[in-house]
Amino acid sequence: MKKKNIQFISFFFPTFFAQKGYHRLTHPHSHKLRPHEEVVLDKAEKSIFKYGSFDIQMYEWKAGPEQVLLIHGWEGQAGNFADLIEKFLENNISVVAFDGPSHGQSSSGNGQTSLFQFAELVGVLVRKTGIKKLVSHSFGGVATTYSLSKNPDLKIEKYALFTTPNRFVDRIDVVAEQVGLHGRAKKKLFQKLEKELNLDLSQINVEVFVQNIQVEKALIVHDTYDKVLSVNESREVAKNWSQAQMKEVEGTGHFRILRTDEVLQIVLDFMEFDKKG
């Protein structure tokens, strides 16, 4: 069915189509890992962490005493960081990663998950591991900054973000476009989410979260011509985050940025790990 027709029908059945949008927002799709990513995951020590109704798949690669925690993006998984993990290990840096709720090898709990379950898990794991250096990709930046803003006692030394969204309402607009929501249906979707979460969605902005988190130094790396997530999102966040510096790159896109050697080296240099051990 053409999108124009779907939008027309959604005008008359807004509740039904709002539910479709809600399902899309809370049921992440699973994407197959590249062979190299599977190889790197196979080298990790694996364990299961119980989080609510979820069995969270944890991964750990032990090297030196320094540690970093990796937070993947929405519909991503720990294996997406394979090239970065290898670079850390080459430099005697231990790595901890996980698959988010309903992502990768983690269980789907009651069949759905949300930004806030993901974000709460990040806070739990940062506290549990005691790791002070973080790396996130895309949506992982929303979950991490939200979680840190809700846990002001958590102090982070270095935090590197491979791109970051800013406003959550923009994510909803993308989903609305994908499922063909008309104005009335999209309004009902907003109302459903705000009622369920007891939050004003317009206030869920990374540029606000970062002003209330304990991060000594941050680095945001974003491809200037990223077609999945506009570089303007990261620019807005960096503009409102005094502890952050912004580095724009080219020729990597939204996903290849995680496996471009020059970019990975930028992140490694920023982290300033003590390589002894």
Image (tube, rainbow, N blue to C red):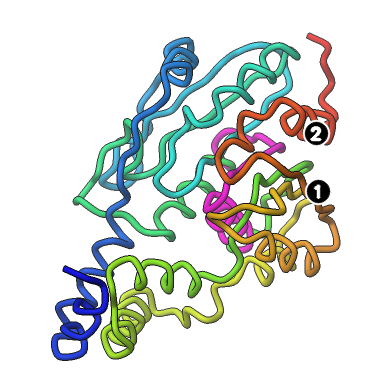
Q: Residue at x 14, y 86 (%)?
A: 13
Instruction: Indicate whether residue 223 is drawn in magenta.
Output: no
Residue 112 image point, x, y percent: 25, 54
In the image shown, does 235 or 203 lie closer to the viewer?
235
Dot label at residue 266 = 2
Closer to the N terminus: mark 2 or mark 1? Answer: 1
Residue type, label 2: Ile
Residue 20 left/right relative to 266 = left
Residue 22 image point, x, y percent: 27, 68
Residue 215 image point, x, y percent: 76, 52
Residue 267 left/right relative to 174 = right
Q: Residue at x 32, y 50 (%)?
A: 28
Q: Which residues are magenta?
A: 127-149
Q: Are marks 2 and 1 in contact (CB under 8 Å)?
A: yes
Q: Is residue 162 above or below residue 275?
A: below
Q: Helix or strand or loop: what does disc 1 sit on?
A: strand
Q: Is residue 66 above or below residue 25?
A: above
Residue 121 image point, x, y percent: 46, 47
In the image shown, does 2 or 255 lie closer to the viewer?
2
Q: Residues within 10 Å of mark 2 (few under 14, many from 20)?
A: some
